[in-house]
Amino acid sequence: MPGTYSQRDIQITDDGDLVNDSNGDFLVADINRSIVQSVMLCLLTEYSDFNAYNEIGSTLEQYIGENNTQDTADNIAQEIERALTARGTFQGDDIEVDVIPISATELLIKLAIYNSITGETDITLKFDLDNLGATLVTSE
């Protein structure tokens, strides 16, 4: 499946700090890291909370305290797809989302994002329904 995403961005750490090289210049992230950064920014930002771009973000906070059922997992998957495609950064055909309940309060979110450079970037997140914690588990 050919992906349309081809943008690269300034590299940041998982905490959001800019990454510099030994000369003090900003590093440019490779395509896979750029995708991970875009996904995390979108999913961890509350919808319309980013003043410069109101369409960035998700409404995942609405699932705090919800029962961890297949319906909840399906609704979260739909919200992730909506959030990632709302601004046009990703196209619907370029995203696969699988949300798997792994405990009474935790979900594993597996994303496959297809791009035009490396083909596919796989991202796995752990999502906690008790406190809306989303943790990056792996990315390739």
Image: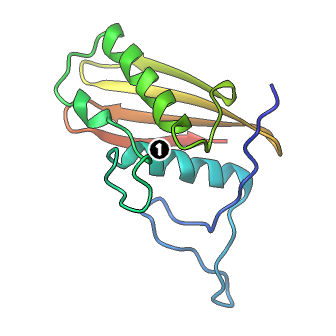
Q: Quadrant of the N terminus?
A: top right
Q: Residue at x 69, y 69 (%)?
A: 28
Determine whether the residue tagged by mark 1 lies in a helix, strand or loop: strand
Left or right relative to 60: residue 12:
right
Q: Is residue 10 above or below residue 5?
A: below
Q: Residue furthest bottom?
A: 23
Residue at which label 1 appears: 136
Quarter of the image for residue 120 reads top right
Task: Specify the color scheme.
Answer: rainbow
Q: Residue at x 63, y 39 (%)?
A: 90
Residue 128 location, x and y as percent? 29, 33
Query: How many marks are shown on the rendered structure?
Result: 1
Q: Relative to 16, is 91 above or below?
A: above
Residue positioned 62% across, 27% down in the render: 92
Residue 25, position in %: x, y?
66, 85
Q: Nearer the viewer, residue 118 or 48?
A: 48
Residue at (56%, 41%) from the top-left corner?
A: 138
Mark 1 nearby-residue class (10 Å; few <14, some 14–19, many ≥20): some
